[in-house]
Image (cartoon, rainbow, N blue to C red):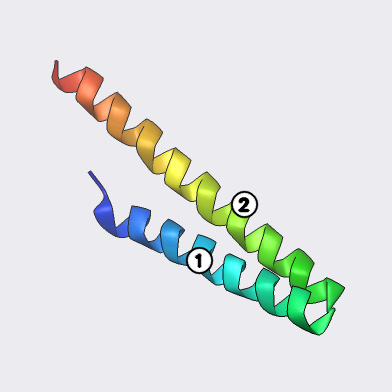
Amino acid sequence: MSGTDKVAGKAEELKGTIKEKVGDATDNRSMQAEGAADQMSGKTKQAAEDVKDDLRDDRND
C-alpha cells in the first residue's frame, strides 16, 4: 500500500478546495477553475492508488 501517494492525492484535493473557495470569495474564475482541476487531479490520484491496492490484494490471495 502506498500511503504516501494517497496522502499526496488528498493534499492536492484539499489544496484545490481551498483555491476554489478563495476564487469564489474573490470572484476569480481562473482560481476557481484551478481549484476544481486540482481537486479532480487529487481524486484521480487517490482512485489510482486504490486500484493498485486492490490489484496487490488480489495477487496476494
Task: State the image coordinates of residue 11 (x, y, percent, origin top left).
Answer: 44, 66
- Which residue is pictured at 62% across the width and 52% down the height? 40
Horizontally, residue 6 falls left or right of residue 39, namely left
What numbered label is drawn on residue 40? 2
What numbered label is drawn on residue 59? none
Horizontally, residue 61 falls left or right of residue 36, namely left
Task: State the image coordinates of residue 59 (x, y, percent, origin top left).
Answer: 21, 20
Say what secondary structure mark 2 lies in. Answer: helix
Residue position marked by numbered label 1 in the rendering: 14
In front of the other: 17 or 12:
17
Direction left: furthest residue = 61
The reply to whether callout 2 and callout 1 are in contact (CB within 8 Å) is no
Horizontally, residue 29 falls left or right of residue 10, namely right
- Which residue is pictured at 85% across the width and 79% down the height? 27
Q: Amino acid at mark 2?
A: Met
Direction top: furthest residue = 61
